[in-house]
Amino acid sequence: MSSTNEQRLDAALKRFRSHPVISDFREFLLSAPVEELFHIDPTRLARNWNVPRRTVLEVLLRAVRFGILGMEWAFHCPTCGGVAKESLKLAHTHEQDFCPVCKYDFRNTLDENVEVFFSVDPEIQKLPADVKSRYERQIVEDITKGGRHEWQSSGTIKGVEVLNHPVFRDIFGDETLSLDQSLEIRSATVLFSDVTGSTSMYERLGDARAYRLIRDHFDLVFRAIDKHDGVPIKTIGDEVMGVFVDEASAVRAAFDMQDALTSSNDSRGDGESLTLRIGVHRGPVIAVTLNNQIDYFGRTVNIAARTQAVSEPGQLSMGEPFFRAPGVKETLRKRVSQVKRGAVTMKGIDEPIQVYRVTLSQQSGTSTDQ
């Protein structure tokens, strides 16, 4: 790297201010082989820097905003693994693409065939032209010899991981899909929370004071979502919708939300006690643009919202597949002594659904083997 480019890098890194891994990031950019700068591996960096992968992704995303890195979306053919299309912006993507090798159209799924990769910006370091050509030749060779290019590894960044990162939504808020496009996500964990008794609270306290309590509650809920690797999607009145990487993370977040709200109730000492009811569900969703931001829709979202609606104040409710998902029972055992199960008819859902309910204020127990 030339001295001029190093100066550009140092000037851009100052915009991170006091981020704890910036010295490590700088050393990586100055000393890494060109192949590692072409497709940056967040898992390797997380291991080398001794930080969570999510923290590395935060650094990479901010580095794109600061002109240190570039970011591309790659759409792999589900059959041969080749790259059917590359795009610099989410707005340029489509729900369907064509593979010129396999000669067929395929639908893009953010957690299956959409990859995001980061590479050093040419203004910081210009990589040799043959780096990308070698990458492309390798894809062709893999498909020619073995019929498929295996593009996924522990260092692969799926599109859903970026889309559900709070920093992406914060600093790339204008990165949305075209209004006539949607992208599938095969499996997403959706949570809905709602403050119970808010209507009577507004009547009792007046709009200004009641809204301050609701606003403070939003802050607590958002923090709990972020702490457990989730991302807030939107608020609907007093409700919050969040999406998580897995079921157990959503359960931990639900308990943290009510814990934080209970602590806030106690510290205020005004006699007002805000309580949540929460519902969770996991399944396929579609990502679309609504109100100039990425939003999620589909049956999974509807069931998560309906599951929240049948919860009692202070309860977390979930369907049977969610309850039996990896890590959920283990997480519940640390907090609850009883799980209630029963069939519930939900508005707009054809068949009754088995719902498991737990009280969020319970402490440690063993009776979760339903």
Image (tube, helix red, strand yellow):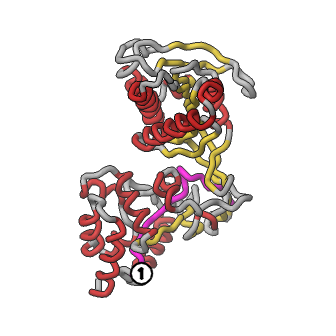
Question: Residue at horizontal 61%, vertical 53%?
Answer: 294
Residue at disc 1, secondary structure: loop
Q: Residue 49 in the image: x percent, y percent? A: 25, 57
Q: Nearer the viewer, residue 180 or 284?
A: 180
Q: Residue 146 in the image: x percent, y percent? A: 48, 62
**Looking at the image, residue 58 lies above or below residue 23:** above
Q: Residue 10 in the image: x percent, y percent? A: 30, 76
Question: Residue at horizontal 51%, vertical 68%?
Answer: 72
Question: Which region of the structure is painted magenta?
Answer: 105-123
Q: Is residue 192 visible?
A: no
Q: Nearer the viewer, residue 58 or 32?
A: 58
Magenta stretch holds residue 192: no
Q: Is residue 68 visible?
A: yes
Name the side, left or right, on which 325 lies relative to 180.
left
Q: Quadrant of the N terminus?
A: bottom left
- Tell me where residue 349 sits by quadrant: top right
Question: Residue at horizontal 53%, vertical 26%?
Answer: 276
**Looking at the image, residue 361 lies above or below residue 3:** above
Name the side, left or right, on which 96 lies relative to 87.
right
Q: Nearer the viewer, residue 321 or 261?
A: 261
Q: Residue 57 in the image: x percent, y percent? A: 40, 57
**Looking at the image, residue 110 lies above or below residue 125:** above
Magenta stretch holds residue 115: yes
Question: Residue at horizontal 43%, vertical 74%?
Answer: 67
Q: Give, as a three-letter code, the residue at label 1.
A: Pro
**Looking at the image, residue 230 lies above or below residue 360:** below
Can you identify the residue that label 1 sits on?
Answer: 122
